[in-house]
Image (tube, grey):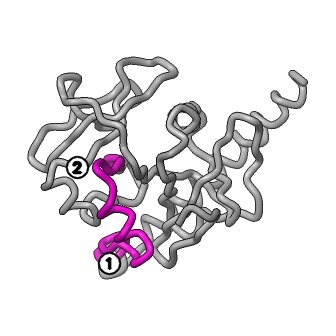
Amino acid sequence: MTDLRASLAEQKQKLRGRLRFRRRHFAANLDGMARLAAFRALPAPLVEHLAEAAVVGAYAAHGDEPDVLPMLADRAEAGALALPHHAGRVAEMDFRRWRPGESLVKGPWGTRQPDDAAPPADPHVIFCPLVGFDRRGGRLGQGGGHYDRYFAAHPAALRIGIGWSVQEIDACPRDSADIALDAILTEQELILCGDRL
């Protein structure tokens, strides 16, 4: 079993390297108009779910990740947006409320996050960044397992992955700790992966 896990971890790490290169190249060569239009409007199937959600979880884009905060500006202005927060280099991640104009601080892995004093929140819908994805809801993240642990502890939250279309692969390698997404949103389409949307 240990050999299988090690082999799967190695496979995921190699795949991450290729997909990060692909994402970086795609984002660097995206023309200005396409960049302005990407991830600016919520697809119709998500509008109703977000209207019913008391809190929506998103993330502050890092590097070449798609920026979804403009798409969720009304939720942020209403105080109904939360971003991931890490108390340190620990396994657990939570969400803290954030509004435009409030500062973001550098987290333990270099990502921007709300200050430690920001109020905690439990999002009903979570938009999470991807390194890779497949059409069955498979998600390849950064490798720390933070989102998978959060999803496992909050199974009722809708899970929507965010990525550029070039990050799609035929099948993401999965183990028992990997939690499937309900949908994936790219700059081109909304892919429904289960029956919760």
Q: Residue at x 31, y 81 (%)?
A: 33
Q: Mark 1 points at which residue?
A: 37
Quarter-wise, where is residue 118 in the image? top left
Quarter-wise, where is residue 110 in the image? top left
Q: What element carries label 2?
A: loop
x%, y% of residue 148? 58, 37
Q: Is mark 1 on a helix, strand or loop?
A: helix
x%, y% of residue 146? 52, 32
Q: Residue at x 28, y 43 (%)?
A: 82
For residue 5, side relative to residue 160 (left or right): right
Query: What is the magenta range?
Result: 36-60
Residue 52 counted in the magenta span: yes
Q: Give the label on residue 171, or none.
A: none
Q: Which amino acid does label 2 sit on?
A: Ala
Residue 162 counted in the magenta span: no
- Quadrant in which the N terminus is drawn: top right
Q: Give the label on residue 80, or none.
A: 2
For residue 182, side relative to residue 118 (left or right): right
Q: Which amino acid does label 1 sit on?
A: Ala
Circle 2 residues within 10 Å: few <14, some 14–19, many ≥20: many
